[in-house]
Image: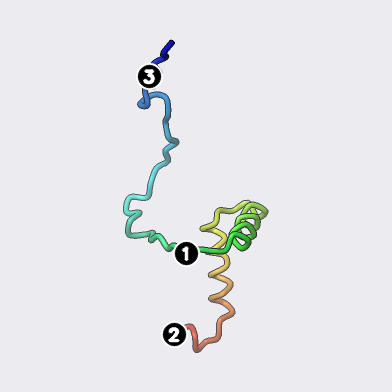
Amino acid sequence: MQLDLVVDLSTKFRMATRPREPDRKTTRQIVGFSLSPEIARAVKAEAAQRGVSLRKLFEELWAEYEKTKPAKARQ
């Protein structure tokens, strides 16, 4: 016995959509880097514990770095 399965993908799967910023391409840029599995787990756990996204966690980290780096490095 052979079964044929037909799935209408146009109605079966719908992605949640939210309004995008009008000029998002000019307000965001993807920055990619690779971490060891141990550090990646620790970073994800920290973001989850704080209830923030990885992007937000990095923004917080960067803001603290900017406050504490030596004046000579700020230029």
In 3D space, how far apart are the residues under numbered discs 2 and 3 (Cα atoms)?
Answer: 61 Å
Q: Secondary structure at mark 3?
A: loop
The percent position of residue 41, horizontal first and vertical second, equals: 62, 57
* Displayed quadrant of residue 7: top left
* Amino acid type indicated by mark 3: Val
Q: Depth check: 38 or 3 in front?
A: 3
For the C terminus, the quadrant is bottom left
Q: Secondary structure at mark 2?
A: loop
- Mark toward the start of the polypeptide (2 vs 3): 3
Q: Secondary structure at mark 1?
A: loop
* Amino acid type indicated by mark 1: Phe
Numbered disc in front, either 2 or 1: 1
Q: Depth check: 67 or 47 in front?
A: 47
Q: What mark, if any, has residue 49 been given in the picture?
A: none
Q: Is residue 3 above or below residue 35?
A: above
Residue with the mark numbered 2: 75
Residue with the mark numbered 3: 6
Q: State the residue at coordinates (44%, 62%).
A: 32
In 3D space, how far apart are the residues under numbered discs 2 and 1 (Cα atoms)?
Answer: 24 Å
Q: State the residue at coordinates (42%, 63%).
A: 31
- Mark toward the start of the polypeptide (2 vs 1): 1
The percent position of residue 46, horizontal first and vertical second, equals: 65, 58
- Compared across the picture, whether 25 is left or right of 64 comes to left
Numbered disc in front, either 1 or 3: 3
Its colouring scheme is rainbow
Residue at the far right in the pictured view:
49
Residue with the mark numbered 1: 33
